[in-house]
Image: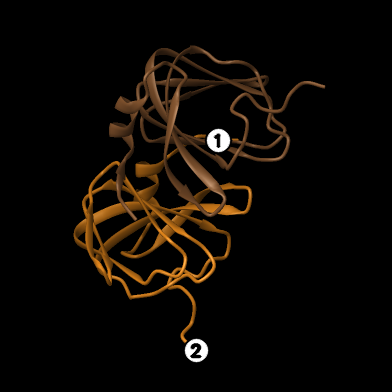
Chain colours: A orange, B brown
Amino acid sequence: MHKVNLLAEASKVSELWGRVTPLKFNDYDVHVNRIKGEYVWHTHADTDDVFLVLSGRMIMQLRSGDVELEPGDMFVVPAGVEHCPKADEETVIVCIEPRDTAPAGDPEI
Amino acid sequence: MHKVNLLAEASKVSELWGRVTPLKFNDYDVHVNRIKGEYVWHTHADTDDVFLVLSGRMIMQLRSGDVELEPGDMFVVPAGVEHCPKADEETVIVCIEPRDTAPAGDPEI
């Protein structure tokens, strides 16, 4: 049992698109990610995907359009919805996912 | 699919210790709570309990001692651990819990 300052955790992430996992609850992990640039389009078939922006600004690209997220904004990508995070500046986000969820989603078949 | 500014949600909470539930993911709810004063000592036997402070300051009272939480601090109370949130000033927190978790924990038997 220990408290975690989420933003401070970002300093432990050595490279962009890297992450640390400072907390776990039940069968979920809480990840802190440093991002800049564009990730890859992907889908999680079996789980919703939770994002919270701590600093900077993230664009959640969806096939239906972009959603701009600023610090304090939370967004849930429903299971099965294709998405691609992007950030023009360095941005720190929290992702909450079931343990062992592949970051880039399900492999294409 | 909509973004939610967590701190802004607090303005929709009409009374202290009240809450709104602006987001859901899988079988979990994301609650935003306004708190001040002391809650009740309680335990969740079957789930960890996730807290994130957005503004103000929360004291998580545990039988093993107090933990002070400031904005950006996250804390997980493991299942089965008795706890009692307290705030000397008005504080806004996020709680993440499995849907239908009783806020005050399991009834005493």
The image shows residue A63 at horizontal and vertical percentages of: 28, 72
The image shows residue B8 at horizontal and vertical percentages of: 28, 33
Q: Secondary structure at mark 2?
A: loop
Q: Secondary structure at mark 1?
A: loop
For the point 69% across and 27% down, the residue is B43
Output the chain of dot 1: A
Work out how far the residue at label 2 is from the one at label 1, CA to CA, in angstroms.
41 Å
Q: Are marks 2 and 1 in contact (CB under 8 Å)?
A: no
**Mark 2 nearby-residue class (10 Å; few <14, some 14–19, many ≥20):** few
Q: For the N terminus of chain B, give its image quadrant.
A: bottom left
The image shows residue B36 at horizontal and vertical percentages of: 43, 13
Q: Which mark is residue A2?
A: 1
The image shows residue B86 at horizontal and vertical percentages of: 51, 16
Up-down: is B9 above or below B62? below
For the point 33% across and 75% down, the residue is A40
Q: Residue furthest bottom?
A: A109
Foreground residue among A10 and A43: A43
Labels 2 and 1 within one chain: yes
Q: Which mark is residue A109?
A: 2
